[in-house]
Amino acid sequence: MFVVATATVFGNSTGTIPPVADVNLPIIYAFSRWDSNYFLDIAAHGYEGIQHGYSFRPLFPLIIRAVYPAFFWLDLRSAEVVAGFLWNLVALGIAAVYLERLTKLLFGLTIASRTLLLLAVYPSTFFLSVIYSEATCILFIATSLYYLETRKILLAGGLGFLAGLARPEAFLVAIPFLVKTLFEDQKLRKLTAGLVVLASVPAFAAYGYLQTGNLFAVLQSEITGPKCTILCFISNPVLNFANYVLPYTINFAVFIIAIIFVVYPLLRANTSSRIFPYYLWAFILLAIVFYSGDARSLARFALVVPPVFWAQAEYSLNHPRFFQALVIVYAILMSLATILFVNWYPML
């Protein structure tokens, strides 16, 4: 896909130069786009002097920093891109194994297979390959939830903590831990593990304080970062439709589909108490993101939330034509979104 997308050069839709220069690599340079620059700069130089840098969690840059010296014959930025790309492939492979095991435990083999297929063709799946933290995040979310279900609860909490250091919203994976304390045994362990996951937020805030002397450096970076939320659009829908909605139709359409399918199991009477906490977590996360997240990244936020794919895969069991159509539509949208992203279009 990236070979085709790289060869399909449209230019930059804004009429301006690309915001980040291409690295000196054939084909693979297309994996470094937009926010990739933040991760690469943090990996090389830390957070100091990077405007809005604290909006990005440190785990993925730390991994790049640990791996890129292995490619010593390349210049720094190229070595970082290769390191990040190879790590993403490893992380995605491990995540797929754990996601299949987890889904099989909860729903059975058929839904597990369909979940992986939907994830493979999801319109923003290409973010699992590019120099973004999604692959790292889904790895630690999938492993955390798997070990939660296999009763290695403290290990699950530690992995959830790492997920919270991969993406800002990932700390909400603590919700299943905390809700399960109401319905299941080992309440103290699940409560402790949930609190460990939540601790990723104050831990990174403490790091920001040590670096800047400002306890709210992380929060201020996230609040003041350049983004247009759904409220931004509503405040002036005529002006913002062309700027923020029309170019990001894939985001809105896919995200609304995700919300609809996550809500359905919450309202359904036969959803088990074992599975309910996961759909509750997904709904809360999607609701927060829809309210406060960047409209350009909605589909990407849903990418690392397995219940989004579980709900669609489960519904498709009794609606095979729906599943076939969804896979085809997702694959087409992913192809389009990948081409646009690689060629510096501000989409997804």
Image (cartoon, helix red, strand yellow):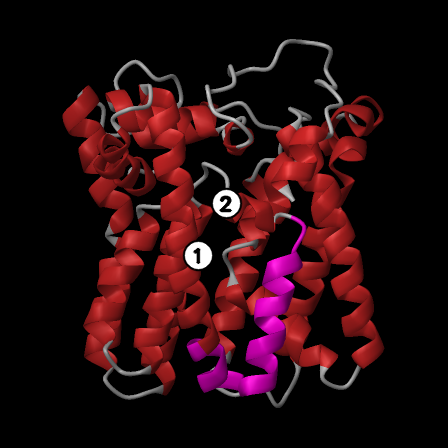
Circle 1: element type: helix
Q: Please name whichever residue, 70 or 208, is drawn nearer the observer in this view of the structure.
A: 70
Quadrant including the N terminus: top right
161 vs 238: above or below: below
- The quarter holding residue 79 reads top left
For mark 1, does the 10 Å Cα neighbourhood hold few (<14), some (14 to 19), or many (20 or more) residues?
many
Please state if 9 lies on the left or on the right of 201 as rendered.
right
Q: Is residue 231 visible?
A: no
Residue 92: give its label. 1
Residue 113 sits inside the magenta stretch: yes
Q: Main secondary structure of the magenta part?
A: helix
- Residue labelled with disc 2: 129
Residue 172 sits inside the magenta stretch: no
Please state if 326 lies on the left or on the right of 193 as rendered.
right
Give the amino acid at mark 2. Answer: Ser
32 vs 177: above or below: above
Quadrant including the C terminus: top right
Q: Which residues are magenta?
A: 101-123
324 vs 13: above or below: below
Residue 21 point in image, percent of width and height: 51, 14
**Which residue occupies 39% across, 25% down?**
78
Residue 295 point in image, percent of width and height: 64, 37
Give the amino acid at mark 1. Answer: Leu
Alpha-carbon span between mark 1 and mark 2:
8 Å
For mark 2, does the 10 Å Cα neighbourhood hold few (<14), some (14 to 19), or many (20 or more) residues?
many
**Proximity of marks 1 and 2: CB atoms separated by less than 8 Å:** yes
